[in-house]
Image (spheres, coloured by chain):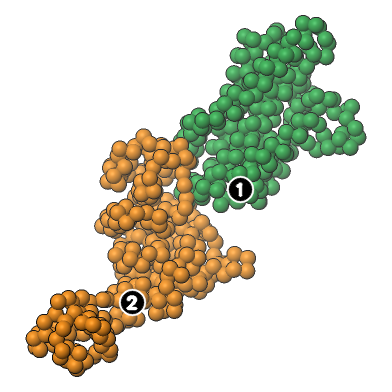
Chain colours: A green, B orange
């Protein structure tokens, strides 16, 4: 019976999301666009057979786009939760027999489905316009991306728990999440960062996402990345526990 | 009569602010009970404690024999709630909201299509929430509060911000809820609304209940004065009117007389005096005190202040 409510709520939230004028583009279109544009630019570099460019195009770019997917899902979650709180929608739903965690689970499912859809779109776009003729383990990569998104979503929840108003939700989320990319090892390997940033990278969850995604994309086995998965799981548990403590419904 | 809501000595504070204190009352089966008072008096806090959305610091609450804190999900199955200032998703359609709400309860929901028809929302079936008028939104919230065929319906400031016409339409709907045998608990800061709609009211101010009774009993207990205003140019009128038993004051300006006195008999006595003395009047009206006056008398200030 609670599953019926969860399913209805999830389905309605997906429909509502697609009705937002910029919602679908901002969350799905933007990462795919970044992927395509950068792919074109780097693709020209590939013609001059620069080794660095080809390395970025083969591994870095898909991972960057994936991380962008995850972050934009999370930002949209943070925004939606704070808008719903401000509008009393969360409170109204809580005045029904719907369990509080069901309400939040519905939003997480919507965002995970969104991430999966964006990834699928990116793969399709990549196949047609993008010269990555690699045998990439897409299924494992999709799982890795879902694990990463799930974990980053829990950070999003923590942010959503503490942002004061809906107006600040998006900027605060962006300020917290985007700088994480810089130290995540995506552009510069973590080992070659200055020692201070090195330490920062160790506690930034995105570092583990990037390591996991890069590894799986390159064809590593899961066992090689058990540590990354474990770190992401810890992030998930800690953030979820913290937000359960500080989450405000109104 | 069987009480369906029992509140005894409830206290709720936010930090150092005492929102409600020593609040006790009972709501009986099948009545419309109103909690009335100015904004910030503690109406919503009291209501949300009863609904299980807030936990009181002290005191006991029982709704349909259930404890709103421990049995909150059981309780929510059996009550319907409309919250003050709550919204829905901007782009949710009317039928989607009704469909979603219907799926949230274990017990079989009532026919949503018929419900929307009764509430006059049939032609808004496919409209987005954000495109509804204030009155339509409130009617949708009533629909959502009724979808699980609840035994008690909670309505918090239901008609605030609505124009008089929509307000009257909503009043009829609320009376309709009572006619279905349900108990209605509502809050309002509109004395006219309380007077027209409620079987019994509790007046709350600064978090405390000042008095509870039927609106007309509150008026006759606290404001027994009656006022008659009449127009006449009969020179004997002043003297004759002053002689009426029970009259406390007669104020005369030009040809208009304002007669004040105590008790329900005043009006009859004035009419009797007029006819006995063949005093010709060109205007005659009575001014009866209402809940507004009761509030003023009990608190020393108007509810609008």
Give the SS element for disc 2.
helix
Q: Residue furthest right?
A: A195
Give the SS element for disc 1.
loop
Residue B16, given in percent of the width and then of the height, sits at 62, 69
Residue A135, given in percent of the width and then of the height, sits at 70, 10
Query: In this rendering, is residue B277 above or below A220?
Result: below
Of residue A27 and residue A101, the one placed in the foreground of this image is: A27
Question: What residue does disc 2 label?
Answer: B218
Residue B150, given in percent of the width and then of the height, sits at 36, 53
Q: Count neighbours of disc 2 (C-alpha within 10 A) and say few if under 14, some if 14 to 19, many if 20 or more.
A: many
Query: Could you tell me which chain the residue with mark 2 belongs to?
Result: B
Of residue B292 and residue A144, the one placed in the foreground of this image is: B292
Q: Count neighbours of disc 1 (C-alpha within 10 A) and say few if under 14, some if 14 to 19, many if 20 or more.
A: some
Q: Residue furthest front?
A: B254
Question: On the same chain: label 1 and label 2?
Answer: no
Q: Is residue B215 left or right of residue A26?
A: left
Query: In this rendering, is residue A91 above or below B279?
Result: above
The CA span between labels 1 and 2 is 43 Å
Q: Is residue B223 left or right of residue A55?
A: left
- The residue sitting at 33% across, 63% down in the picture is B193
Q: Are marks 1 and 2 in contact (CB under 8 Å)?
A: no
Query: Could you tell me which chain the residue with mark 1 belongs to?
Result: A
Q: Is residue B202 visible?
A: yes
Quadrant of the rendering where the N terminus of chain B is positioned: bottom left
Query: In this rendering, is residue A241 above or below B213?
Result: above
State which quadrant residue B107 falls in: top left
Q: Is residue A87 left or right of residue B281?
A: right
- The residue sitting at 73% across, 19% down in the picture is A61
- The residue sitting at 68% across, 17% down in the picture is A37
Question: What residue does disc 1 label?
Answer: A165
């Amino acid at each position: 019976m609670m599953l019926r409510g969860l399913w209805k709520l999830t389905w309605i939230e997906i429909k509502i999301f697609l009705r937002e004028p910029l919602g679908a583009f901002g969350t799905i279109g933007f990462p795919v666009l970044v992927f395509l544009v950068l792919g074109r630019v780097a693709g020209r570099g590939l013609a001059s057979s620069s080794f660095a460019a080809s390395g970025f195009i083969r591994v870095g770019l898909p991972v960057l786009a994936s991380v962008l997917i995850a972050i934009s899902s999370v930002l949209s979650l943070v925004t939606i939760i704070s808008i719903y709180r401000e509008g009393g929608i969360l409170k109204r739903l809580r005045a029904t027999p719907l369990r509080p965690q069901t309400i939040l689970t519905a939003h997480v499912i919507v965002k995970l489905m969104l991430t999966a859809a964006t990834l699928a779109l990116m793969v399709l776009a990549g196949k047609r316009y993008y010269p990555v003729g690699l045998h990439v383990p897409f299924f494992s990569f999709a799982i890795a991306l879902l694990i990463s998104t799930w974990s980053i979503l829990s950070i999003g929840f923590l942010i959503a728990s503490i942002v004061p108003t809906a107006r600040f939700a998006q900027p605060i989320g962006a300020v917290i999440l985007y700088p994480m990319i810089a130290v995540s090892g995506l552009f510069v390997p973590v080992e070659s960062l200055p020692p201070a940033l090195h330490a920062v990278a160790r506690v930034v969850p995105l570092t583990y996402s990037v390591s996991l995604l890069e590894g799986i994309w390159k064809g590593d086995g899961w066992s090689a990345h058990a540590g990354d998965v474990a770190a992401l799981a810890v992030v998930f548990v800690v953030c979820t526990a913290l937000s359960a403590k500080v989450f405000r419904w109104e | 009569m069987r009480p369906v809501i029992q509140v005894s000595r409830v206290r709720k504070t936010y930090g150092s602010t005492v929102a409600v204190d020593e609040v006790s009352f009972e709501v009986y089966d099948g009545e419309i009970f109103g909690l009335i008072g100015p904004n910030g008096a503690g109406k919503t806090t009291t209501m949300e404690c009863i609904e299980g959305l807030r936990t009181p610091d002290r005191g006991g609450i029982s709704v349909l024999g259930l404890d709103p804190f421990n049995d909150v999900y059981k309780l929510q199955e059996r009550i319907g709630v409309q919250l003050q200032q709550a919204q829905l998703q901007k782009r949710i359609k009317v039928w989607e909201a009704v469909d979603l709400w219907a799926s949230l309860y274990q017990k079989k929901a009532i026919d949503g299509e018929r419900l929307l028809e009764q509430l006059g929302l049939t032609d808004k079936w496919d409209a987005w929430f954000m495109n509804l008028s204030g009155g339509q939104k409130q009617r949708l919230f009533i629909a959502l509060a009724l979808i699980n065929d609840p035994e008690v319906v909670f309505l918090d400031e239901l008609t605030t911000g609505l124009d008089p016409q929509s307000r009257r339409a909503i009043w009829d709907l609320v009376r309709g809820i009572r006619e279905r045998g349900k108990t209605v608990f509502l809050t309002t800061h509109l004395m006219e609304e309380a007077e027209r709609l409620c079987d019994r009211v509790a007046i709350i101010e600064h978090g405390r209940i000042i008095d509870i009774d039927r609106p007309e009993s509150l008026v006759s207990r606290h404001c027994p004065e009656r006022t008659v205003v009449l127009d006449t140019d009969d020179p004997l009128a002043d003297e004759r009117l002053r002689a009426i038993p029970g009259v406390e004051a007669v104020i005369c300006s030009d040809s208009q007389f304002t007669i004040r006195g105590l008790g329900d008999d005043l009006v009859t006595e004035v009419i009797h005096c007029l006819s006995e003395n063949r005093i010709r009047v060109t205007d005659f009206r009575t001014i009866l005190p209402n809940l507004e006056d009761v509030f003023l008398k009990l608190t020393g200030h108007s509810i609008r202040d």
